Amino acid sequence: MDTGADVCASTPTASGRSQPIAILQSRVDELCSQLFSFSKTRRTADLDCGDIFPVNAAKAVFTAENFEECVWAYFTVFHPQQPLLHWPTFDMHSVSLPLLLAVVFGGSVHCSPTDGALSCRAFFDFGEEFIFEQLRHIVAAKPDLHSDPHAMESVQAGLLIVALQSSFNSEAVRRRVRVSRHPELTVAIRSLRLLDPMIHSSHQNKVPDWDAFIAEESRVRIVHFMCVMDYMNTFFFNLLPNLAIGEIYQRLPCNDALYDAWTQKEYERLCVESLRPTKQIPSIKQLVALLMSENWWDEQKNPLLSILELRHLMICVFALHSIIFVSRAALLTPSSYRDLLRATKRWKELWDTLHTKHEAEREKSLGFVKHGLEMWWVTCKVLELAHAGDSQSRYMEVSPTDSLIELHSFLKQYGNCVDG
């Protein structure tokens, strides 16, 4: 997780941030009570059963003031790097308790070091178990996503707590995520049919309905948040991806400023002004297929340049790396090498052009987007070594790990051989 202090250019006004403390406190107390009750009935081998519910820490964590500070930190620091939730409609009074807990925990690591924020860490493992227990109940109930918003919120909570836990240098936590949490999230997303193609209304309104847009875009972002975590597990820890690129039908996420529009009026204005209509944005499946196809456009006539953003290409390079990994694991590198090499070269063309435009407009890259070229270089080097049959580095072995040592050693061994 990138914890830099970058600020999103599309940060909405802090309208409605302050909640009536007494009303919010009752909600926080309800969550604390549920967690305490859960602690008395749930014991897992992964948790410290000697003090599964830290009562003293709870006094600092479960206050309305601490929740407000942590939620604010989440949306002003983490959200700009990976905008999963719709901030303008996020309401601490009505959002599901698992998602509220995940957002508070996610924000706590970006807060000023208060007792409340620091004490949150005592609950991370337990909160993770609580969130996934709730997710299991949701999946078992087979809800209608259109009538039960808490279904998607449960998945969002699972994604956020896994992203948070994975950001710490703990092999034990990474192993738990690899063996249990990540596969369970994949099953949940499939069971709730979030991967299914979305049916769009047949009317040709210039500006889609705001509520419909929020619902669609939130689903799109759940799928791609999961995809990125899946691809990153392959990139950093040599895990076979759980999601096939061929089953991702949803388009790539829209521009973050459009998603973060604070009012319907602002949303409609941005839709009219947008040079990238959401209906033109390709899926990651379509984009990868284009990069690997026989046909391609001249650099100056490439229509993708007016549609794609650097964030899309960041997702794409992780996807290409996962395809290369699967090809290596299936011994298909000799037959796929030409297409994959061509795809990486085309990706670099798109990146260079969009990055130049990005810098000219003085836009700031956030999160992993700042390291796009480094990710591309690793992807190309792995393909080159696989084609040459070079397996000197342990990173080139197709066996999972819970450590970053293999990747660090790979970078140390080949990092001085950067190709153009």
Image (cartoon, rainbow, N blue to C red):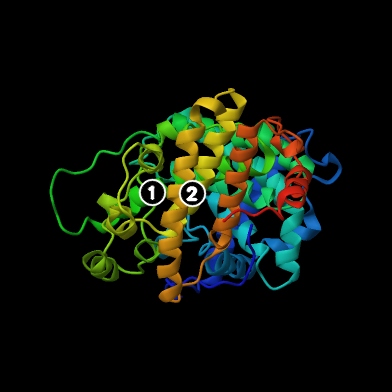
Q: Amino acid at mark 1?
A: Leu
User: Under tag 2, what secondary structure?
Assistant: helix
Residue that numbered label 2 is attached to: 315
The answer to whether one can see residue 212 in this image is no
Look at the image and tell me in which quarter the N terminus lies: bottom right
- Examine the image and state in which quarter residue 258 appears: bottom left
- Residue 353 drawn at (x, y percent): 41, 62
Q: Amino acid at mark 2?
A: Ile
- Label 2 to label 1: alpha-carbon separation: 9 Å
For the residues labelled 2 and 1, say whether their Cβ atoms are less than 8 Å apart: yes
Residue that numbered label 1 is attached to: 252
Depth check: 300 or 35 in front? 300
- Residue 51 drawn at (x, y percent): 83, 46
Query: Please, is residue 63 above or below residue 101 in the view?
Result: below
- Residue 31 drawn at (x, y percent): 61, 52
Depth check: 331 or 147 in front? 331
**Residue placed at 46% from the left, 31% from the top?**
190
User: Under tag 1, what secondary structure?
Assistant: loop
- Examine the image and state in which quarter residue 385 appears: top right
Q: Mark 2 or mark 1, which has the lower sequence index?
A: 1
Local packing at callout 1 (Cα closer than 10 Å; few below 14, some 14-19, many 20+) is many
**Residue placed at 45% from the left, 42% from the top?**
343
